[in-house]
Image (tube, helix red, strand yellow):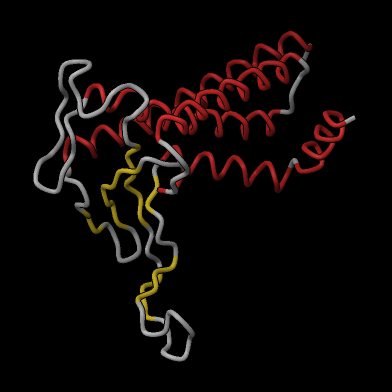
Amino acid sequence: MSDNKQILSSKWIFCLIVLLILVVDQATKIWIKTHMTLHECIDVTGWFKICFVENNGMAYGMELGSKLLLSCLRVVLVSMIVVYVVRQIKAVIPTGFLICLSMIVGGAIGNIIDGIFYGLVFSESSSMFVAEFVPFGTGYAPVLMGKVVDMLYFPMIETTWPDFVPFVGGQPFVFFSPVFNIADANISVGVCMLLLFYRNRLASMMQKHNS
């Protein structure tokens, strides 16, 4: 395959992966937002539940500083990654490496959409009422201040710490307690694949950057 054809193919792969992630991520979030009350849970299996929660922070419900600062930081970081991907595509990027970056970009954009638009177009979710679409700009929060919708919960082990364990003895323990979304999952899988299969390439890139 010539370089021009490979570059064109890489562009299509990148766009299609990002678009697919956004469609699935936003479709699930909008359904959850408009059909479930806040903190409502649906038992799918004993180890998998759909639980509607919202957060102001980073992936898996973590929080870091102010919401506005975090939203702006997300936009800047994703923009930098997109610029990097475009440059790598022009340099004929390996397909596997491109897929990893595409998953990270798609997931990051998915969560950015929540922060930018959800506060503008949705009424506020609560434990009593399901959110609804409202006229643009009349929602529960201004631009960049919307909350990220999470729903995937995998409490694979639910038990109690033994009494002899210091500080937490006798307290409930849940293995893998974070609630996350499709965007978070793609970011995590993309990063893990980069570290597993492309750590040498990443190390080489860091060396070039520092030299």
| Residue under the point 9% across and 46% down | 128
**Which residue occupies the foreground of this view, 131 or 62?**
62
Residue 69, percent from left and from top:
46, 31
Task: In the displayed orientation, state which residue is furthest to the bottom.
Answer: 164
**Which residue occupies the foreground of this view, 41 or 48?**
41
| Residue under the point 54% across and 28% down | 105
- Image quarter where the N terminus lies is top right
Task: In the displayed orientation, state which residue is furthest to the left.
Answer: 128
Write down the quadrant of residue 173 in the picture: bottom left
Residue 42, percent from left and from top:
22, 54
Residue 185, percent from left and from top:
48, 44
- Image quarter where the C terminus lies is top right
Task: In the displayed orientation, state which residue is furthest to the top.
Answer: 4
| Residue under the point 38% across and 59% down | 154
Relative to 125, say whether 208 is above or below: above
Residue 11, percent from left and from top:
62, 15
| Residue under the point 34% across and 43% down | 55
Relative to 25, say whether 15 is above or below: above
Report the side of 111 relative to 18 (left or right): left
Task: In the displayed orientation, state which residue is furthest to the right.
Answer: 211
Report the side of 171 relative to 193 (left or right): left
Report the side of 198 relative to 44 (left or right): right
